[in-house]
């Protein structure tokens, strides 16, 4: 009988990936990024250990929303005060802050636990082609 492999936090090898979101659906890109952040694409994935990688998302402003989501979908938040509901259409959000739209999509796809919150710290999103983490030599992730 063989033993089940369990990754240990000290033995996790983290890589850097770069994902190009240009002309790709926002949600599908976010799902792949969430899998990379959690480490689900690795054969050594262990659910209770944070074994994910660093992910850089470029061209977030060129990600597309399918259907009529640009006109019909809203980003809603509440201030906590009475009548404090704030709404922003996704057409406005994608034109002014596309990084936030991608971050919200990825945040909704990682678990709301300490592992998920730690994974989100390894997410770097940029609206254009340029990114700061050149020294880490990220490899392009194709899906």
Image (cartoon, helix red, strand yellow):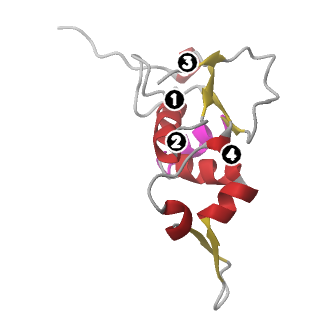
Residue at image coords 48%, 46%? 27
Furthest-left residue in this view: 1
- Nearer the camera: disc 1 or disc 3: 1
- Nearer the camera: disc 2 or disc 1: 2
Position of residue 111 in the picture relative to residue 14 (left or right)? left
Which of the two discs, 2 and 1, labels the residue nearer the N terminus?
A: 2
Q: Does the magenta stretch include residue 53?
A: no
Residue holding disc 2: 30
Which of the two discs, 2 and 4, labels the residue nearer the N terminus?
A: 2
Circle 2 Cα neighbour tier, 10 Å, few/some/many (<14 / 14–19 / ≥20) = many
- Where residue 52 sits in the image (x, y, percent)? 54, 27
Tell me which segment is drawn in magenta: 110-122
Residue holding disc 1: 36
Q: Identify the disc placed on residue 61.
A: 4
Give the CA distance from mark 4 to mark 1. 21 Å
Image quarter hosting the N terminus: top left
User: In the rendered view, would you say 86 is above or below 106?
Assistant: below
Q: Identify the disc placed on residue 12.
A: 3
**Disc 2 element:** helix
Which of the two discs, 4 and 3, labels the residue nearer the N terminus?
A: 3
Using the image as rendered, state which of residue 87 and residue 12 is in the foreground: 87
Give the CA distance from mark 2 to mark 4. 13 Å
User: In the rendered view, would you say 78 is above or below 132?
Assistant: below
Q: Is residue 115 magenta?
A: yes
């Amino acid at each position: 009988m063989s033993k089940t492999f369990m990754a240990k936090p000290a033995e996790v090898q983290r890589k850097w990936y770069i994902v190009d979101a240009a002309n790709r659906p926002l949600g599908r890109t976010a799902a792949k990024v969430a899998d990379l952040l959690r480490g689900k694409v690795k054969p050594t994935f262990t659910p209770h250990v944070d074994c994910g990688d660093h992910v850089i998302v470029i061209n977030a402003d060129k990600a597309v929303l399918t259907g009529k989501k640009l006109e019909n979908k809203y980003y809603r938040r509440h201030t906590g005060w009475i009548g404090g509901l704030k709404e922003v259409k996704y057409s406005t959000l994608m034109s002014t802050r596309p990084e936030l739209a991608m971050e919200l999509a990825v945040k909704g796809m990682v678990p709301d636990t300490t592992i998920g919150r730690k994974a989100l710290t390894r997410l770097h999103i940029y609206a254009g082609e340029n990114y700061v983490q050149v020294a880490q030599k990220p490899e392009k992730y194709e899906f």
